Image (spheres, rainbow, N blue to C red):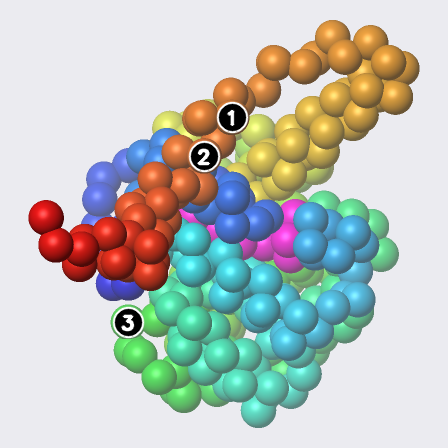
Amino acid sequence: MTRKSFRGLLAADGPLILPGAHDALAARLIERAGFTGFFIGGFGMVGARYGVPDVGLKSLGDLSQAVRDILAACELPVLVDADDGYGDVKNVVQTVHTYETLGVGGLFLEDQCWPKRCGHLEGKRVVPVEDMAAKIRAATSERLDPDTFIIARTDARAVTGLDDAMRRAERYLRAGADCIFIEALRSVEELERVGQAFPLLVANPLAGGISPILSPAEFYRLGFKILPYGIDLILRVTRSMQEALADMRAGRFERMGTGMSLQEYLEVVGFDAWTRIEETYAPAARDAADKPR
């Protein structure tokens, strides 16, 4: 599999919309829908794979296995949430190398204290700015591939205010970050202020979060290029499964037949391609081909 560069996606005009994939099936659907890249965040991934919230319960080993499985199903460039790097500067470098080896082309590191939590929830804490700057220096200096795109995320807006968040962002850029992500901005005015201050930015239009939800075009106009929609699919999938189970439990089965058809699903997961391999190379097929005619 030859995966295109994540950094290369930034050359195209307009906003870069990155749907969030919580599992391999979601990644396949994102690719089939025609998107140029996608996002893997902890919120949906640990919920779908382990049934737990994104509050620091899973380690790099757990998360990298999930990322590996998702990447195996999809050839698109990917941006991955690498949390705080799972330790000090040496752990950060190990995290970057682990994801690079899996084929990840872009990742972001955050300045939350561990255990972290979703950026739009209360109770966050941030590390000293010197500690995060050191992590960014280590990550960008020791990455295996200079093309790997490293974003510095700060959660300071909710903890110490917007002024401190912007000072931290400037410090992280000086440490070598390729891009800035100030999480959980509260208003269009804050988006405008940040958009005017930095050349390349990530916005987080989180469903149900505390930031304004604007159109991709409006985010782009304000200066925000990279738009990960990290939890939209997992929220919709979860609701659909709840409704189907309630219908089944009640014995109504009114929702039966409202999802994909069996044939459509088999097409999504590549049934025909695997059937061709089986029919071409399995012993029964080989024996039939070898029989004299």
The disc labelled 1 sits on which kind of residue?
Leu
Relative to the observer, which residue lies in front, 112 or 105?
105
Q: Which element is circle 1 on?
A: helix
Cα distance, mark 3 to mark 2?
A: 36 Å
Q: Position of residue 148 (x, y in %)?
A: 35, 71
Magenta stretch?
37-45
Look at the numbered disc 3 and give the secondary structure of its residue: loop
Question: Rounded to the nearest whole Å, what is the CA distance between mark 1 and mark 2?
Answer: 6 Å
Which residue position is annotated with label 1?
Answer: 262
Q: Is residue 68 left or right of residue 185?
A: left
Residue pictured at 79% horizontal, 60% vertical: 55
Labels 3, 1: front one = 1
Q: Is residue 66 left or right of residue 151?
A: right
Question: Which residue does the image show at 23% across and 39% down from the upper left?
Answer: 13
Determine which residue is flagged by label 2.
266
The residue under label 2 is which amino acid type? Leu
In the picture, residue 271 is in which quadrant?
Answer: top left
